[in-house]
Image: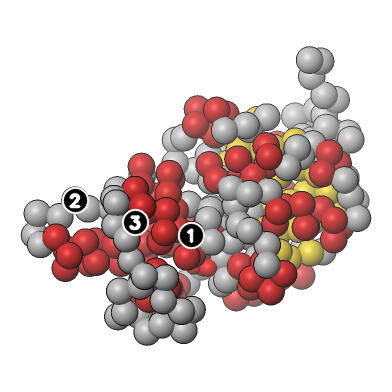
């Protein structure tokens, strides 16, 4: 295959829209999610198995079973990896109830507390890159599994920088299956009026890479914040960067 002609934004010249994941790509919130998941799962496992419990691994377990997936899918996939079967419960379950939704709600409480206490920051390189692609006339969407996406974007002043938002709330309203399925990215491309082949996907999660590949998008950028460049490539990244700003001026 011949290598594509890259523009000043580091993307093939056939690309007219950019679909950005949020946590870990635009904002420094992947680590906050990871910490909240670990606190919730370790507390659950300790109560269940006693002091000798096997803790949640914030690298391997997070990236394989939780990262990038909608909240309840993260609970289900991790529990399945430990052969633990819990009732589904209901989305309104209180955080102390031992159901899929109860555990998810507990994690959300812990996440919101951390966000309230420590605040949220955007990656300066991502903010610059976002401005550059908009300046170059490309359309933009944020495609996140998180139901907290809008609040997080608002808190860093970036809510208006995206033409389209497909997040955990919008996906639930439209009944879209989450990453690793491609449906949320495909919905964003459709809302922007572009074919998947004209859209670039920006993702830090392996589930997001799988969604990019399954949707046959025009270009997939792996964003490596944790030293998993090789895994991002294996899951379909066309290129891997540690900072979005590194894409500029590659042409
Ligand atoms: O619980 P939320 O805010 O709806 O987020 C769901 C998921 O959103 C993804 O963006 C994160 O990578 C996951 O860690 C998180 O679990």
The residue sitting at 68% across, 39% down in the picture is 214
Q: How far across and how far down the image is residue 166, in percent?
A: 71, 64
Q: Secondary structure at mark 2?
A: loop
Residue under numbered circle 2:
54
Quarter of the image where one finds residue 210: top right
Residue 129 in the image, given as x and y percentages of width and height:
72, 48
| 64 is higher (above) or lower (below) than 149 | above
- Which residue lies at the image location 68% right of the left edge and 48% below the top edge? 182
Could you tell me how far apart the alpha carbons at marks 3 and 2 are, in whole angstroms? 12 Å
Which residue: 34% across, 56% down?
Answer: 79
Q: Secondary structure at mark 3?
A: helix
Q: Disc 3 vs disc 2: which is toward the camera?
A: 3
- Figure colour scheme: secondary structure
Q: Which mark is residue 73?
A: 1
Mark with earlier residue (3, 2): 2
The residue pinned by badge 3 equals 79
Q: Is mark 1 within 8 Å of ligand 1?
A: no
Asked if the residue under mark 2 is in contact with the one under mark 3, i.e. CB atoms within 8 Å, the reply is no
Q: Is residue 125 visible?
A: no
Name the mark on residue 155: none
Give the camera-side residue of 178 and 159. 178
Please name whichever residue, 145 or 180, is drawn nearer the observer in this view of the structure: 180
Q: Is 183 above or below relative to 217?
A: below
């Amino acid at each position: 295959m011949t290598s594509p002609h890259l523009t000043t934004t580091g993307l093939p010249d056939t690309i007219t829209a950019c679909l950005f994941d949020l946590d870990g790509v635009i904002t420094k919130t992947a680590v906050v999610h990871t910490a909240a998941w670990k606190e919730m799962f370790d507390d659950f496992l300790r109560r269940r198995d006693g002091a000798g419990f096997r803790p949640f691994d914030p690298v391997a377990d997070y990236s394989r079973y939780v990262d990038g997936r909608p909240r309840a899918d993260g609970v289900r996939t991790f529990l399945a990896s430990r052969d633990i079967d819990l009732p589904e419960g209901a989305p309104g379950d209180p955080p102390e109830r031992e159901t899929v939704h109860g555990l998810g709600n507990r994690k959300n409480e812990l996440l919101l507390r951390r966000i309230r206490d420590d605040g949220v920051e955007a990656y300066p390189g991502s903010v610059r890159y976002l401005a550059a692609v908009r300046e170059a006339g490309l359309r933009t969407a944020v495609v996140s599994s998180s139901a907290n996406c809008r609040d997080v974007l608002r808190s860093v002043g970036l809510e208006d920088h995206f033409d389209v938002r497909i997040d955990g709330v919008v996906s639930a309203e439209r009944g879209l299956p989450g990453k690793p399925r491609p449906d949320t990215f495909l919905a964003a491309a459709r809302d922007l009026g572009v074919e998947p082949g004209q859209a670039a996907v920006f993702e830090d999660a392996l589930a997001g890479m799988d969604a990019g590949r399954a949707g046959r998008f025009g270009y997939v950028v792996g964003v490596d914040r944790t030293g998993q460049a090789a895994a991002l490539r294996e899951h379909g990244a066309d290129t891997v960067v540690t900072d979005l700003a590194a894409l500029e001026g590659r042409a």
